[in-house]
Amino acid sequence: MRKLTLLLLICLSTFTFGQKMIKGSITFRSSQNVYVTFENTEGIQAGDTLFSEVKGWNVPVLLVKSLSSTSCLCLPISNLKIDETGFILAKVPVQEESLPDHQTSDDLEATKSVNADAIHAVSQVKKETKPQPRFDGRIALTSYTNLTGDSSNQHFSNNQRFRYNLSFNAQNIDSSAFSAETNISFSHMLNGWKGISDALKIYSLAVNYKAGKSSSVTIGRKINMNMANIGAVDGLQYEYTHKTMTYGFLAGSRPDYYNYSFNPNLQQFGAFVSQNIQTDNGNMQTSLAFFDQMNHFKTDRRFAYLQHSNALLKNLNLFASAEVDFYTMVNLQPKSTFDLTSTYISLRYKPFNNLSLSLSYDARKNIYYYETFKNMIDSILDKETRQGLRFNFNYRPFKKMVWGGTAGYRYAKSDLTPTVNANTYLSYTELPWIDAYGTLDVTYIKSSYLNGMVYGASLSRDLMDSKLYGELKYRLVNYDQNNSTSTLMQNIVECSLSWRMAKKLMLSVDMEGTLEASGNSVRVYMNLTQRF
C-alpha cells in the first residue's frame, strides 16, 4: 500500500548581528540545481547558505554555487521540500552608515533606537487596527518530452506529458482575518487520458481564519508544519498559542493513496503540543503528536510522532525525529505494541564561516513521491544514499572556491551487504577567460546489487545581463551489476537555458541526452512561469 509522507528535516541556524534578510524567489529547478532570483545579489557570495521560512524559523535549504547581479545558481543541501511559491531568504551584511563630523557612534545608536521604537509603535498600532493583506502566486505551463530509441532499429518512441499549475497565497484578504492558499496541477499525456482523478492533483486548498491573536481555524486540504510528517490533511485543523506553547488538533481524512484525490473512507484524527523557546544560541523547539489513522473506521495505524530541534551551542544545531507505533495485527487480531518504526538525527556544526560540517543518521521509512521525473541513475542514488549514517562537509578555502562532499553507510536487514557511498565536488565561481562557474564531481556507490562510479563536470554562467542563464553538464556512469555480467555504461549530457522574458515571466528549457549500448534517450523539459 502506497502512502504519501512528507518528512520535515530542520536544522536551525543562528542569527548574526550586522546582517539583514533579503527575499528572493525560485525561478527554475533542474534535476540537480535550483535557480533563485533577487532584486539584486549585493552582499551574497558563492558558498553562502540560503534559507526557507518554516513556521517562523529560517531553515537552511540551498548553497550558492554561482551568482550574477540578480540571480543565484544553488545546490540543495536539505531534504525539505521547498515551496516554489514561497520566499527564499539570504543573509547579507548591513552597510555601515557614515557619521557626520559632529555625530558620534553613541549618538547614532541612540537615534537608531528612538527610530526603531517609533517604527515599532506605529507598526503595532497598524497591526492592532487593520491587518495588512498580502497576495502572491504563479501560473506555470510545463512540457515533458521523453524520446527513447532502440539500438537495433534506431526507432524512437515519443512520450510527451503536459502539466498546468496554479498556486497562490492570499494573506488577510481585504484586511480581514481570513486567508486562503491553493496549489493545483492538471497533467495529461499527449495521446492518453485516464480520467479527471488521474489528471487533477490538489496539493493544498484551504481557508484559514485567525480568531484573535492566539487561535486559528483551517478548513480544507493543508499540511500542518507542526505535524508535517503525516502529509496533507483533508478536514478541520485548530491551533491555539499561549506564550511558548502551541496546542492543536485535527479531524478529517487522508488523500487517496493512488491518485491523491479526496477519500472520506481514510479517516484520521490527532492532536499535538509544541513548545518554542528562544535561547541565547537560537531557537529550541519540541513537538509531540498522536494520531489514529483508519480505513472505513477500522484502525489502519496508531502512532506518535516526536520532533526536537535545538541550537545546542552557538554554531552547533541538532534536529531529531522519531515515530512510535502503538498498533499491530497478529494472526488477524489487533494488538497493542510499542515499536520504534522511524528515527532521524542530524547534527550541523559550523566552526568557521567558511567551513560547515554535518552528520546524520536516517532510519526512516521510505518516502513515496507521486510526481517525480528522474532518470535511472538519479533514482538509484536517491534510494541508496538517503538512509543510514551520513556525513557532509562544505569548505571554502578561497573566496571563489568551494569544496564539499558527502559519505554514507547503510546496513539494513534487507541488504545482503552494506551500502557505501561517497561524493566530492570542487567548484570555482569565476573561471578565467570565460567568467563561468565550473564544477567537477565524483560519486562512488557500492551496494548489494551494483557498484561503480559517476564522474561529472559542469559549466554555467550568466549569458545576457541576468536575462539569460545557461548551463552545460556531462556525466560518465560506469556501474557493474553484481547479479549479472552486464555493465551499465552511460554518457549523460545536459544543457539548460533560463530566459527572464519580463520581470515576472520566466521561460526555462532543459535538455538531457543519455547514450548507452542498448539505446539512446532524450528528455526535454520546458517551463513557462508567470508570477503575480
Image (tube, helix red, strand yellow):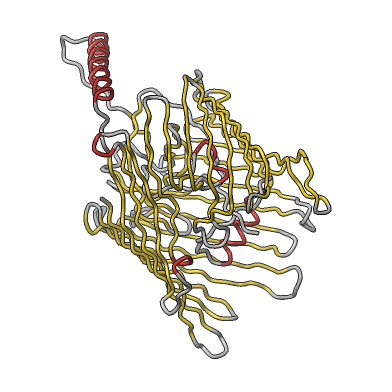
Q: Residue furthest bottom?
A: 153
Q: How far from the left and from the top, in percent, is residue 414?
A: 77, 56
Residue sitting nearer the eye, 251 or 192? 251
Residue in the image at 43% along x and 35% along y? 217
Residue sitting nearer the eye, 130 or 57? 130
Q: How far from the left and from the top, in percent, is residue 215?
A: 42, 28
Judge whether 475 appears above or below 345 on screen: below
Q: Residue furthest front?
A: 297
Regarding residue 97, the answer to whether it shows in the image is yes
Regarding residue 430, the answer to whether it shows in the image is no
Label tally: 0
Quadrant of the frame with the N terminus: bottom right
Judge whether 346 appears above or below 425 on screen: above
Residue in the image at 27% along x and 13% along y? 113
* Quarter of image, res 464: bottom left
Residue in the image at 27% along x and 42% along y? 40
Q: How far from the left and from the top, in percent, is residue 194?
A: 48, 73
Q: How far from the left and from the top, in percent, is residue 475?
A: 52, 65
Judge whether 486 appears above or below 530 on screen: below
Residue sitting nearer the eye, 384 or 181? 181
* Quarter of image, res 132: top left
* Quarter of image, res 309: top right
Task: State left or right for residue 346 relative to residue 437.
Answer: right
Judge whether 506 appears above or below 168 on screen: below
Residue sitting nearer the eye, 129 or 42? 129
